[in-house]
Image: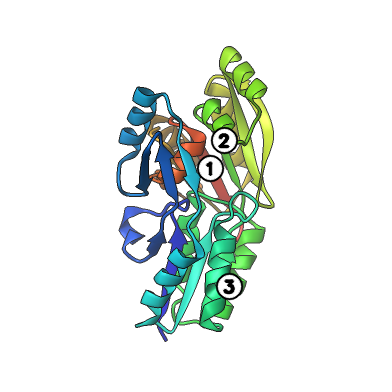
Amino acid sequence: MKIGIVIDSTLDVSDEIRDKVNIVSLTVRIADKVFKDGDISLEEMFDMVRKTNSFPKTSQPSPGEFEEAYRNLLENHDYVISLHISSKLSGTYSSARLAAEKFKGRVFVFDTLSTSIIGDFYVRKILNMLDKHPEEIIKELERIRKGSTFFLTPGDLEFLKRGGRISKAKALLGAVLKLRPVIQVVDGELVAKKISRGKKGPLNYMKRVIEDYSAFFLIGGILEEKIPQELAEYAEKLGKKFRVVMVKSLSLAAHLGPGSFGVAPFEYV
């Protein structure tokens, strides 16, 4: 039995397992140019934003794009497991579900109810269970999902505002006061947990998250290496198990901005 893995491009995975998955990319538009994840680097995207003063806009893949990915994989795989950004944050999951209906029980679509670096954990879990039936794997992913969450702080509130996640007034106030919120993904939705000035408040909040949770952590950032490294050193000092996964997704970075960082705890491993 052979199982293929599909993810959308909002889910980040480590370089060492990237060739184990098939990525269906969201589209990023900046001014009059359109890109897929991998077409340009994060540095190039944000440089283009600065030069054009035009913020990125993203759009989900069509059902047809997922259908093509599934059909190609099923030529030499028995089943496909497809992992996706929270259905409450994007229509990507719905596109995947529509496409999966055409393959009569051979494609299993899973809503992570989260996004970003959590993709790395789920993909590794699947890779360790490839001898199991997809239904058993999905049940295990559901068990893991119950004990996982994601805390993040955006690097620039303007990106959240442009993406429709916060109001113009809140973004302006945040910029003037140099506020940095900590946001938690709760049941697939973004919930503000704490607002501080500068990076220190969110950094200390993430350290408390590492203190409070026990099993395993993913730590990441968007063009921000210093803080993830500091969080990793703190986790190591406490004897916690963790892995650093840096964000490379254009479509995710387009909504959070450079300098973002986060921690994803998993209680069940």
Disc 3/disc 1 C-alpha distance (Å): 24 Å
Disc 2 marks a residue whose amino acid type is Met
**The residue positioned farthest toward the bottom in the image shown:** 1
The residue carrying mark 2 is 206
Q: Is residue 185 above or below residue 25?
A: above
Q: Are marks 3 and 1 in contact (CB under 8 Å)?
A: no
Please, what secondary structure does the residue beneath circle 3 have? helix
**The residue positioned farthest toward the top in the image shown:** 176
Spot occupied by residue 118 in the image (x, y as percentages of width and height): 51, 53
Q: Are marks 1 and 2 in contact (CB under 8 Å)?
A: yes
Disc 3/disc 2 C-alpha distance (Å): 29 Å
The residue carrying pointer 1 sits among few (fewer than 14), some (14 to 19) or many (20 or more) residues within 10 Å by Cα, namely many
Q: Nearer the viewer, residue 235 or 103?
A: 103
Q: Write the residue at 57% across / 79% down.
A: 136
Q: Write the residue at 45% across / 39% down.
A: 253
Res. 157 image quadrant: top right
The residue carrying pointer 2 sits among few (fewer than 14), some (14 to 19) or many (20 or more) residues within 10 Å by Cα, namely many
Q: Is residue 243 above or below residue 23?
A: above
- Whether residue 124 is visible to the viewer of this picture, yes or no, is no
Spot occupied by residue 17 in the image (x, y as percentages of width and height): 35, 61
The residue carrying mark 1 is 263
The residue carrying mark 3 is 138
Q: Earlier in the sequence, mark 1 or mark 2?
A: 2
Disc 3 marks a residue whose amino acid type is Ile
Please, what secondary structure does the residue beneath circle 2 have? helix
Q: Earlier in the sequence, mark 3 or mark 2?
A: 3
Q: Is residue 138 above or below residue 25?
A: below
